[in-house]
Amino acid sequence: MGGLTDRFWETRRLEEMSRAEWEALCDGCGKCCLHKLEDEETGELVATNVACRLLDRRTGRCSDYRNRRAHIPDCVRLTPAKVRSIDWLPSTCAYRLLDRGEPLPQWHPLITGDPESVKRAGESVSGWTVSEDDAGPLEHHMLDREL
């Protein structure tokens, strides 16, 4: 991974990582780019299969990552502080896991050296989402599983 120290995620805290290391933590699952609904009574978040219009639903990566906030002003830029405060990050999110002192999953591309390992492990949104441009009401797209 050009310029990255081997297994940096085991020796550095999130706050200590370089920009390249931070970005390499993202496994490209695309789960954080799915729309969520909040139950008005309980405050519980429910995921949908509706993806942000910028998500490349084949690769699980943002199609315009560098300029995403120009297109999607409320797109969240993760920071160590936000990782600790955002409750909708998926349970498999590397940022969340490392912040809690947990290891990366064995299918993570930093472990396998293969970005396709996320798909093979069934952890990618690739193949089962719909674009927000085509979805219609989010209520018709709620998932009955946790991400």
Image (cartoon, grey):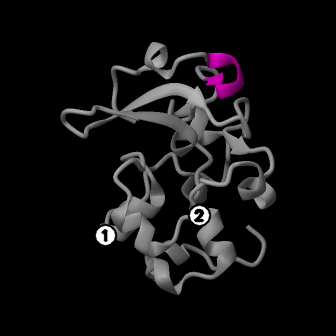
Determine the secondary structure under disc 2.
loop
Q: Where's residue 9, x and y in %?
A: 49, 73
Q: How many marks?
A: 2
Q: Quadrant of the N terminus?
A: bottom right
As rendered, which of 147 and 38 lies closer to the eye?
38
Is residue 133 highlighted in magenta?
yes
Would residue 63 be found to the left or right of residue 55 on screen?
right
Q: Find disc 2 in the rendering and name its residue.
A: 77
Residue range in magenta is 130-135
User: Is any atom of residue 103 visible in this view?
Assistant: no
- The image quarter in which residue 119 lies: top right
Tag 2: amino acid = Arg
Q: Residue furthest bottom?
A: 16
Is residue 19 highlighted in magenta?
no
Q: Where's residue 35, x and y in %?
A: 51, 35
Q: Find disc 1 in the rendering and name its residue.
A: 101
Q: CA distance from mark 1 to mark 2?
A: 22 Å
Q: Residue at x 42, y 20 (%)?
A: 142
Q: Residue at x 42, y 50 (%)?
A: 89
Q: Residue at x 59, y 64 (%)?
A: 77
As rendered, which of 49 and 4 lies closer to the eye?
49
Task: Please tell me whether the stretch drawn in magenta is mainly helix, strand or loop.
Answer: helix
Would residue 116 be found to the left or right of residue 92 on screen?
right
Q: Is residue 76 above or below residue 43?
A: below
